[in-house]
Image: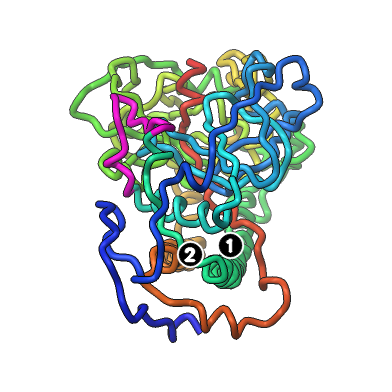
Amino acid sequence: MIADLKPYAAYKESGLPWLGQVPGHWGLIPNRGLVRRRKVLVGKRHGDFRLLSLTKQGVIVRDISTGKGKFSSDMGTSQEVRTGDLVFCLFDVPETPRTVGLSRHDGMITGAYTVFESIGSGSSEYFELFYRAMDDRKLLSPLYSGLRNTIPAGRLLGTKTPQPPPDEQAAIVRFLDWANGRLERAIRAKRKVIALLNEQKQAIIHRAVTRGLNPSAPLKPSGIPWLGDIPQHWEVRKLRQLLSRVTERNRPDLPLLSVVREKGVIKRDTEDRDGNHNYIPDDLSNYKVVRCGQFAMNKMKAWQGSYGVSQVDGIVSPAYFVFDLREVGDAFFHTAIRSKAYVPFFTLASDGVRVGQWDLSESRMKEISFFFPPANEQVAIVEFVARETSGVSVAISRLEREIELLREYRTRLVADVVTGKLDVRDAAARLPDKAPLDTIKDDAELSDETETADEEAAV
């Protein structure tokens, strides 16, 4: 059905630099004719409201009981959000993961956001889809002003938005609900396969870094319930005996690095402002140098497994710990410490000392035990793991690329439909009268978090 979509018969110039032509019968209406700004502070009533957040998955209800994430110290400055309101983040627009979301919840959100309510002249669902498409491609730069790339609310209200006839807006929303459901289901199916492959990979690694390669080797209790027995000849050391803290200040010629739970230490593409949704300050002078072979840890996210031995020289956020290794090979240490055998240690050692964050103190981290064999056996284990998991890693990379292509296709499809490049009226009319195949939001983007503005602010 998607492959059969065609352009409209006639087009006209929109006069908007980011939009180009629109179908000839569509209107162009200033946003002040579609929405109006509403700001009602909750004040002392904040206990009566659920806390909401604008994310890549839209406007969601935050679970404050976990203590994870950053929260305002004064909830009374939050503002009301009602079901059907449009929430915009109009500052730092190029770096913001999501500029707009249609709320399907009553609640409150930080006063830093801008809330608009529909005045009944158009579909809020279409309005959100249109500005999501503009946001995904970061096309609203002509509206930016100031050092923080802010869109003044008055300027947004004066900007025109294309307006198909009401029945056509409904057809666009219905078709994209259906198409997104199909694509989201396909993405989640691939994510499930990736999860199974990662479990298989972790099982191989776990066995190798806790039992070694000789199934006949005598064992001894590790003293750790989830670790079980370990080979009798392996050594046990506290991390304080293996790690030496180093602090080397920023070198401007080195690349910016991050640690993500799925991949370890990676380079960040600072030039890709559209794709890089994580906060990068202009001043990196207080960032720390990480050398190849050194152990880098995001102390605020160590409980998730955000640490690893770097394979390159680079710089990391001041929120990181950086260590030299001694007595153990860096390849074995990286393989073992990132396995499912060790992440629980870091989770248990982390706490909420810092408001809204799970902090890991250096002293508590260094009391974690590490188990390792002689040097030659470390090398053999690393080679075994690389050999036995290579096929799984290739399959995972292929599936991740397929997911990336599906997301790119979804982004392009939404943009083409809401801007009138493709006519979906006939396709929408042929859709079955039942709920979309799947409308649960794809949450895969959450798996590769790097540092965020919250963590930078916590330093």
Amino acid at pointer 1: Arg
Q: Earlier in the sequence, mark 1 or mark 2?
A: 1
The segment highlighted magenta reads 139-154
What residue is shown with label 1? 191
| Residue 123 seen by the camera | yes
- For image coordinates 59% across by 82% down, the residue present is 429
Q: SS class of the residue under badge 1?
A: helix
Amino acid at pointer 2: Ile
| Residue 404 seen by the camera | no
Q: Is residue 148 magenta?
A: yes
Q: Are marks 1 and 2 in contact (CB under 8 Å)?
A: yes
Q: SS class of the residue under badge 2?
A: helix
Seen in the picture, residue 177 relative to 10 is either above or below; the reply is above
Q: Is residue 111 left or right of residue 433?
A: left
Distance of mark 1 from mark 2, alpha carbons? 8 Å
Seen in the picture, residue 253 relative to 141 is either above or below; the reply is above
